[in-house]
Amino acid sequence: MKTEGYNAGEHYDEMISGDGKIREHYNEFYHHLKKTSSRKMNHLQHSANQTQRSMGMTFNVYHDNQGMEKILHLDIIPRIIPNSEWQKLEAGLKQRTHSLNLFLQDIYNERNILKDGIVPSELILKSKDYLEPCIGLTPPKGIWCHITGTDLVKAKDGEYYILEDNLRCPSGVSYMLESREIIKRVYPDIFNQKGVMPVSNYPTKLLRMLQNLSDKPKPVVGVLTPGIYNSAYYEHSYLALQMGVELVNGVDLIVENKKVYMQTTKGLQQIDVLYRRIDDTFLDPETFNPESMLGVPGLFEAYKAGNIAMANAPGTGVADDKAVYAYVPKIIKYYLNEEPILNNVPTYLCREEEDRKYVLDHIEELVVKETNAAGGYGMLIGPKATEEEHAKFRELVKNNPSNYIAQPTLSLSTVPTLTDEGISGRHVDLRPYILYGEEIEVIPGALTRVALKKGSLVVNSSQGGGSKDTWVLY
C-alpha cells in the first residue's frame, strides 16, 4: 500500500509526527501497511464490511430518507494508543467520574456546592434534567453513574481534551467489542505481536458491576430497552446476550407491592437490577412523563423503596448538561481538592452576558452547541457554516441564551484511514467506557469515531461518521 504521500498536514497525526517521522508505537503497523498491496487492503475492508452485515451491526438513523437501518462503517486501520498515554487518560477519567458522582449525590441532597456558589443554583435547579422526584435519594451503594462514556479529542498540541460527559445511557460499547473481533481476524499476527490490551471481558465486568448493586447473593438482572425501533437496539440485545440476562420491554414488567416482576411463561419472576436504556422521563409514567409507553408504572416507587437498582441512576442527566460541563474543573477541585488531570475545551456560556457577546461577535470561528442536544444535532461549526447559518444561530442564541454554549474550533487529530484514494488522514474522537462498581475501572480500549469525509470534524454515526478499533498497548 502506498504510504509515501501520507503526511500529517496542519493537524496532529497519530501515526506521523510533524517532521515526517513515524511515531514509535505505530512502527510495526506502518511497515505492515507498506508491504500490503492496495488490492489486499481493499479486499480486507470488503470482508470486514460483509462481516458487519452478517453480524447485524446496525443502528437506526431517525429522519433519514435513505432508510433507517445503517451499518456503522468500520475502517480496518486501527487507532493505536501507547500505554504511557493511556495511563494519563485512565487517571483523568477516574478522577472525573468520582467527582461527578459526588456532585450528583450533593445536588440531590445537601446542595453544598450550590450553597457555596461554586455552581450557580439556577443552572441546576431550573434544568429540565434535574428531576425533583430524585431529591433526597441516595442510590444503591451511593453510585449514580455506573456506566459513563466520555468523549475526548486530541488537539494540535498533542494533548487530550474532554469534549463531553455521557452519564445517561451512553451507547457504542457493542461496536467497540464487535469491531475488535473483526479486526483481530484482519491482522492476526501483528495484533499478537503488538501486545494489545483485551476488551472482550467487558460484558463480564458489566454484569459483575450490575450484580454488585444488589445485596442478594444471586440477583436477577435485566436490560430494559425501548424496543426494536430504538437507534441502539442492536447494542441492547447484544449486551443482554453476552451477559446471559433477560432483554425486556416495559410491557414485560409489572410492579406489585413496590417490587418489579418480569412476566414469564412460568409466572412472575422478581427482577433486582435493571440496566436501563430508556431516558429518565420515560421510565415511569406515574412519576415522570404520563404519556410514556416505554416505561413501567410504579417502577420509580419500587426504586425509592430499595427493591430494585437501576444503572444509571435516574437523575444523572443533569451532570452531563453541556452548560454544567464548563464547571467540571471547579467540581473536581471542590470535592477532591485536586487539579483536573484532563482539561476541558475552553467553553463560553451564552447565559453569561460577557460570554454571549463574545460568541455573537465571533460566531464564525466557534462551535456552538445546544446544551441538551446529542448525536451532532443542534450544532453549528462556525468555520464550515454559511453566512445564513451564522445569522440563524445568532438569533437562536439571542432568543434562548441559556440553551447554548460555544467552544473554539479544535483541530482534531487525524489517524490513517482507508479511502477510495488510498490511505489518508481523517479526524477522530475517542469514547472510552468507565464502569463504577466496587471501584472505578476504565476499559482499556474505546470507541474511536472517525469523520469519513475529508476535512470534516463531525464524527457522529448519525451524521455519516464511522468507527475504528482502538488498540491500547501494554
Image: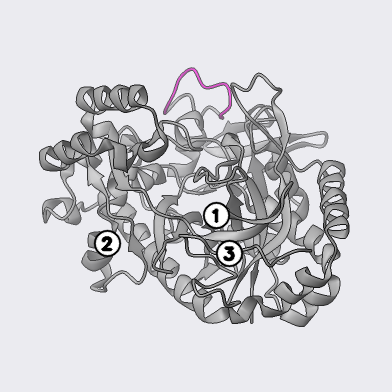
Question: Which amino acid lies under the numbered mark 2 shown in the image of this protein?
Answer: Pro
Q: Where 437 sits versus 107, above or below?
A: below
Q: Label 3: few (<14), some or many (≥20) within 10 Å?
A: some
In percent of the image, x 81 and y 41: which residue is there? Answer: 56
131 sits left or right of 428 in the view: left
470 sits left or right of 397 in the view: right
Question: Which amino acid lies under the numbered mark 1 shown in the image of this protein?
Answer: Val
Tell me, yes or no, whether the highlighted magenta stretch contains residue 457: no
In the rendered image, which quarter contains the C terminus? bottom right
Mark 2 vs mark 3, CA separation in Å = 35 Å
Residue 322 percent location from the top left of the image: 34, 44
Which residue was labeled with disc 1? 428
366 sits left or right of 174 in the view: left
Which residue was labeled with disc 2? 329
Question: Which amino acid lies under the numbered mark 3 shown in the image of this protein?
Answer: Asn
> Which type of secondary structure does the marked residue at label 2 adopt?
helix
> Which type of secondary structure does the marked residue at label 1 adopt?
strand
Residue 285 percent location from the top left of the image: 48, 24
Mostly what secondary structure, the magenta segment? loop
In the rendered image, which quarter contains the N terminus? bottom right
State the residue lying farthest toward the front: 5
Task: Identify the magenta region.
Answer: 288-295
Which residue was labeled with disc 3? 7
Sequence order check, earlier mark of 1 and 2: 2
From the viewer's perspective, is the residue at label 1 or at label 2 nearer?
1
Mark 1 vs mark 3, CA separation in Å = 16 Å
From the viewer's perspective, is the residue at label 2 or at label 3 nearer?
3
Comparing 113 with 221, the one in front is 113
Sequence order check, earlier mark of 1 and 3: 3
Q: Label 1: few (<14), some or many (≥20) within 10 Å?
A: many
